[in-house]
Each structure stands twice: as C-alpha cells, then as structure tokens.
Amino acid sequence: MNRPKITTESAVRLSRRAFTLGLPLFAAGCMTANYGYVSDGGHTISAVENVDPSLMRTEVSWSGNEKPGTVVVNIGQRRLYLVQDGGRAIRYGVGVGRSEGANFRGTAVIGRKEKWPHWTPTASMMSAIPRYRAFAGGMQGGPENPLGPRALYLYRGGKDTYFRLHGTIEPETIGTAVSSGCIRLFNQDILDLYERVPVGATVKVI
C-alpha cells in the first residue's frame, strides 16, 4: 500500500492550519476562565455560567479622545470601557438603571473604593422593592450583599452622588436595564476593574 508522502513544507502548512483553527477555541477558553470561581477575603465568589461572549471582558479598539485611565460608561450599549494607551480600551458588559431617569449622566470621579462594601438601601429603593426594608439598617459585605465584592463610589464636586460601579448577586442581569441606577458588573469584572482604576480616576457616563 502506497502512503502519501508528507514533506516538510506540507507538515508546516498543516501545523499552521491547526494553529489557526485552534486560536478561537483557545481564546474562548481563556475568556471563559476569567469567570471561574474566586476565593477572596475569606469569601467564595461563584463562577458565572454560560456567559454571553459579547458581555465578556475583552480588549477592543478605541477612537475617543479620552485620556488613558478614563472610565467611559455607555448606557445605551450597556458597556463600560476603560481607556488604554495606543487607541485601545478594555470593554466590560454592565447592567444599568431600569429607567432613563434612574441613570447617572455626566462626569464624576472615583471618590473612594471599598472591598466587600457595606450596603444600605435608599428610601426610593425600599419603596420600589419592599423586601429591601429588611435591610434598612444596612448589610455587611459578603456573598449575599447586592454590591458584590467591590464598589467604586462616584463623586462630583467633592460629594457622593450615591451612584456606584459595583458587583452583583444577579449575574444574569448584566447586559440589561434593571438596577436602581448604579452600574453593575460581573463580580469577576469588578475585581479586575477595581485593581486597574485608582481613586481620582475620571468616569464619564453617556
């Protein structure tokens, strides 16, 4: 039986083809791994299952004139961008306010950052969601806290706006308009953003 002769050239072509075909699977695996379970501060952050690829954290091109380090939240797109050098940005999927009037608009700065933040529902939140009244005295940070493992507090003119960038206990709401006005991210994404963004960073919500 005659076997086909495999030359060095054909072997190289096959290797290149296999590498090229494997790249999307490799990239998908890396992106999915970004949403595995995390142990942090004595707590376990659950993995996120079946993440919509369009909502996954990824690097994209950026054509805006914002300085590197600026956070841009696009309410309509339900995406957050952290501007990088060289015309690039890191994009995150987010959940936004359930109504246009609930959303913060304009420019603010990160006034403070908290790990496993304390949460106290506002009067309007308790009115809209009666079960929140049980937490009128506040809730300590932890896996059941609606703010998730991290929060970045938006300030304007030196005052707290009461809008935050934070995690969530409802990962299925990322990419939707459902919050009381704050910008929520997957817990794995707010952990990533928290480490990248310092106090004093500019945040633009458009």
Image (cartoon, rainbow, N blue to C red):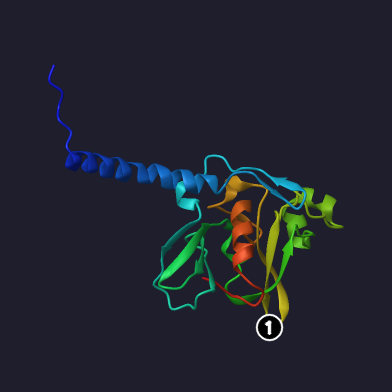
Percent of width and height locating residue 22: 35, 42
Task: From the viewer's side, name the closer residue of 55 and 137.
Answer: 55
Residue 34 lies, with reference to residue 104, above or below; the image says above
Task: From the viewer's side, name the closer residue of 161 and 150.
Answer: 150
Considering the numbered disc 1 on the image, is that residue within a helix, a strand or a loop? Answer: loop
Asked which quadrant contains residue 156, the reply is bottom right
Task: From the viewer's side, name the closer residue of 147 and 181.
Answer: 147
Residue 110 lies, with reference to residue 134, above or below; the image says below
At 42% across and 62% down in the image, what residue appears? 60
- Left or right: residue 189 compared with residue 87: right
Asked which quadrant contains residue 17, the reply is top left
- Left or right: residue 57 compared with residue 182: left
Percent of width and height locating residue 71: 55, 70
Which residue sits furthest top? 1
Residue 141 lies, with reference to residue 165, above or below; the image says above
Which residue sits furthest left? 2
At 68% across and 76% down in the image, what residue appears? 155
Q: Amino acid at mark 1?
A: Gly
Label 1 environment density (alpha carbons within 10 Å; few <14, some 14–19, many ≥20): few
Percent of width and height locating residue 127: 76, 56
Q: Which residue is mark 1?
A: 157
Which residue sits furthest bottom? 157
